[in-house]
Image (tube, rainbow, N blue to C red):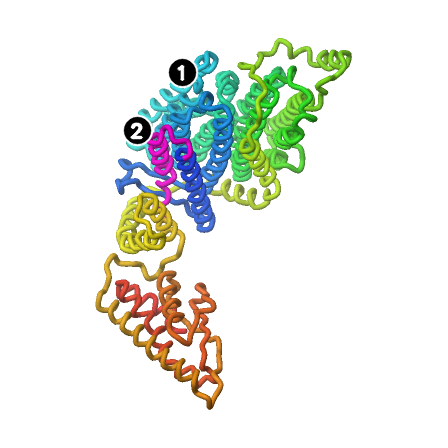
Amino acid sequence: MNGLIPLIVTLPLLGAAVTLAAARRRRVQVAASVITLSAVLVIAAILLVAVDASGTPLAVSVGGWPIPFGIVLYVDRLSALLVGVSAVVLLAVLLFSVGQGAADGDDETPISIFHPSYLILAAGIFNAFIAGDLFNLYVGFEILLVASFVLITLGSTESRIRTGVVYIVVSLVSSILFLAAIAMIYGALGTVNMAQISERMGELPDSTQLVLHLMLLIAFAIKAAVFPLSFWLPDSYPTAPAPVTAVFAGLLTKVGVYAMIRTETQLFASSDINTVLLIVGLATMIVGILGALAQAELKRILSFTLVSHIGYMVFGLAIATPAGLGATAYYIVHHIVVQTTLFLAVGLIERRAGSTSILKVKGLMRAAPLLAVLFFIPAINLGGLPPFSGFIGKYALFDAAAQVGTPLMIALIVGGIVTSLLTLYALMRAWNLSFWREEEEPDEAEAETLSRVAYLKGAPAAAVETEQRVIPRIMTAATVGMVGVTIALTVFAGPLYDLCARIGVGIAQPVHLASCMRRRGVNALRSAWRQMPFFVWLIALWMLLWGQFTVLAFVSGLVVALVVTRVFRLPPAELSGRINLWWGLVYIVTFLGAVVVGSLTVAWQAVDWRRQPGAAIIAVPLRTDDDLIMTHVGVTASLIPGSLVVHTDRERRIIYLHFIGVRSMADVEKLAPQRAALGGEDRARRGLACTARQLRDAASSGGGR
């Protein structure tokens, strides 16, 4: 299972290389991007199920290098969940951008650079979520920075270049501060591995810990757009193309929040600055939503609400209890999905109306009723209206704070409720003006409506006004899909919140990786080497199955082999990396002999007029639950005339066979061909070169039945 972890980062990087090589082949680029992100989504789901079932995080030291020299990749419930949610969002936004590119050409999303940059951005996001050391986390941030600068300036308009420069300067300041903190930590503790840092941090004086703590926190707060370090976001995001804005709003700030969570819960768990975080969280909520109320442009409204709701996450982090951390994890997932969906809906509004100004856009309820629904559902969700996930997440945060019960916590609860109501007001005001207002409204009614929002006339206008354009179906489908995901967060809120509750408990516990990294890394290499013959055999079998010996067949076979070797259970008969020719020959000869005898027996039963052949289903116990061995035994028994596999029970190690020629228990003892085949289980195991120890283990665990 550990071998899947590096693929989370390497697959997007390989996909970026493929899309760059196919710079002018749109279909190849789209296919490569979709396949890459889909593969990461599948891997994240597998890792999440594995980690949640075992309750133990997975970690791998890349290249087998020992700590602190090697790059450590670390996956727990939180990181696996965020990687999976990020992959879903990236896929939806990718499809949205494909529709936009097909309709508008390459002005907004030029295919020669968009897909490579997009996949590199994905690699940076995934790398940050699974980084096990601070320097690798820094590398993830820098990958993000390089790719996001390319994406935010696509089209090279004056406004995008200007805001892109501001974005890059602020990001560089954050990166310099982060890198300086890493250097100081390494100089003081001799490591950048997070697990080792948490073990050694207590050796430093409290004043030194506080300095390092604040340096990291400020660096991450800039990236997360926490007030007062959020000034750059409302001007930077609205100018970018719609799909870029959507993925930035949904994911980039959450990477900073994730880094803050790791800092507070793992590196500086004993250093208490929660009071400062509570005050900052309250200020972020209030200032952000007040900024949204003063805006007349949809993208700027959503950008300020984005800042505001980062305050909820800081609030949950500062509660510093398992319940608070679990509620924070749930709210992060909710906000990633809902905020991305809202920006996609605004992208559709911009195409349909030619503007995103709520003072100019009107009459969309009649013109585009589906679009009205696509904006309305995530809007009331973000505003915290029951029973949606926004309400569930906020209620969980308030409940965790109420359990602490300090006056400052009560103040945060009140501030959170006020922020939620103001969010609902800001978004419903925008919806009413853009959708509910009639296109041909009488002058008196129009003047009365505008007089109620006269305070918005001085608000910044939209960066670009365009003509009305047709909305491609794929853009609508991507947005509908994301709205469906927001609804799914509500429908499946119970299981998701239970998972987040376990995340909260797990984050609050210390992580001890230093002693197990080397062992896991070495065991992973040995296991990979032992599985190599089986791995190569699966690839060759896949290529033979399709009758093609091409690069595509090899790559698809490689993916299939990875899934088979990592998902299907192969204990206790682990392949040793060699084939025992003698036992393999014995297995084949015995099987062929059983086929001949079985054929003669069935032929005799067919012509024997003295008795009618009977039939029975017999449960045959096996010694192993190994997928490969059970498959060999089942196929062998089915190929022998007179018997057929009807069911296999791997948990109980039983294979059910249908036999002909059986009328009583005495007839069962006469089934020599079938008994020979089933007795060939041990021969198959020896033929595949299982070790003697593995045979003894299998016999002791299952041979007594």
Magenta stretch encompasses residue 591:
no
Report x, y in % for residue 643: 42, 74
Q: Nearer the viewer, mark 2 or mark 1?
A: 1
Q: Secondary structure at mark 1?
A: helix
Q: Can residue 287 be seen here? A: no
User: Against 546, is 257 above or below?
Assistant: above
In this figure, which residue is indicated by the disc labeled 2?
Answer: 186
Magenta stretch encompasses residue 9:
yes
Q: Secondary structure at mark 2?
A: helix
Residue 420: quadrant of the picture: top right
Measuring 34% from the left and 26% from the top, which residue is drawn there? 182
Q: Residues within 10 Å of mark 1 (few under 14, many from 20)?
A: few
In this figure, which residue is indicated by the disc labeled 1?
Answer: 169
Contact? badges 2 and 1 (CB < 8 Å): no
Residue closest to the far bottom: 610
Q: Magenta segment range?
A: 1-27
Which SS type dominates the magenta stretch? helix
The quadrant of the image that shows the C terminus is bottom left
Residue 284: quadrant of the picture: top right
Report x, y in % for residue 41: 45, 41
Residue closest to the far left: 582
The type of residue carrying mark 2 is Tyr
Report x, y in % for residue 91: 48, 35
Q: CA distance from mark 2 to mark 1?
A: 26 Å
The type of residue carrying mark 1 is Val
